[in-house]
Image (cartoon, rainbow, N blue to C red):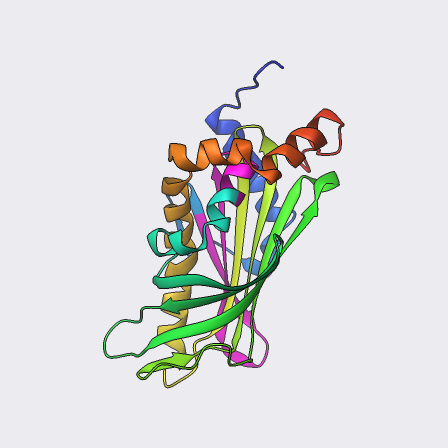
Amino acid sequence: MKKIIIPAACLLIIEFVSIIGLHGSSEWGSPVISKDGINVYMKNIEGSKIKEGMGVAIINARLETITTLMRDVPAQIEWFEACIEARILKKINDDNLILYRVNKAPWPVHNRDAVTQIMVTRDYPNGRIIISSNALKDPLVPVAKGVIRMTDMTSRFVLTYIDREHTEVVMYMKVNPAGAIPPWAANLMGKKLPYNTLLGMKRMVARSKYIEAGKKSKDGREIEDALKNGRIKNSR
């Protein structure tokens, strides 16, 4: 198969079209951060002073390289903003996991933890893999002393095929940090989280460990098969 090289200018156009189309520019407004190929947006949530965040980036990596990274749960401490512990509590199947994660908070704020359910869904006709996370209230892990449990938190990573070596990643994050954190401080942390997380993802997917593992993964085999059979299409 002939390799298609997309110029950087074209990637910028793709990202712009994505933002004004799929993500609704009028709803999200102008970016609050725009650097290193990452745009971060914040929008108001009705009935709450804490905003929802969205980060958008085009990553120089294959779909399966990114999913392989995201399946390496303990490695989240190396790239997911503020994460200092991450582990699998229960594996229902490859696409349905219960995780435990601890986030470091700046002094004098207490660290936060959460038990979350991760669901992976595939929308190959639109070239997407969606990884959703929702906090659970079940006390599968006792709350440690000096840590505050978050039970109102949702996130979603939408990974969209551009070509074999480029993937658009859109990260949505809505978090109620619980405890006595003023909304302005929560929103400041919410603005940094998508940017630093996507920046960390860019760094991690360049590692040969994830590139090679991705090629041999179940996700990789499924994606190759879907491409050969015309079931994955660029949604642009």
Residue 167 shown left or right of residue 188 in the figure:
right
Foreground of the two, 144 or 181 = 144
Foreground of the two, 47 or 175 = 175
Instruction: Count the labels in the image.
Output: 0
- Residue at 61% from the left image edge and 36% from the top image edge: 161
Where on the picture, by quarter, is residue 205? top left
Residue 68 shown left or right of residue 46 in the figure:
left
- State the image coordinates of residue 81 (x, y, percent, origin top left): 37, 58
- State the image coordinates of residue 29 (x, y, percent, origin top left): 53, 57
Residue 115 shown left or right of residue 102 in the figure:
right
Query: In the orientation shown, which residue stands out farthest toward the top?
Result: 2
- Residue at 36% from the left image edge and 68% from the top image edge: 103
Residue 107 appears in the figure: yes
Judge whether residue 57 is colored magenta. yes
Query: In the orientation shown, which residue stands out farthest toward the left?
Result: 107
Judge whether residue 120 is colored magenta. no
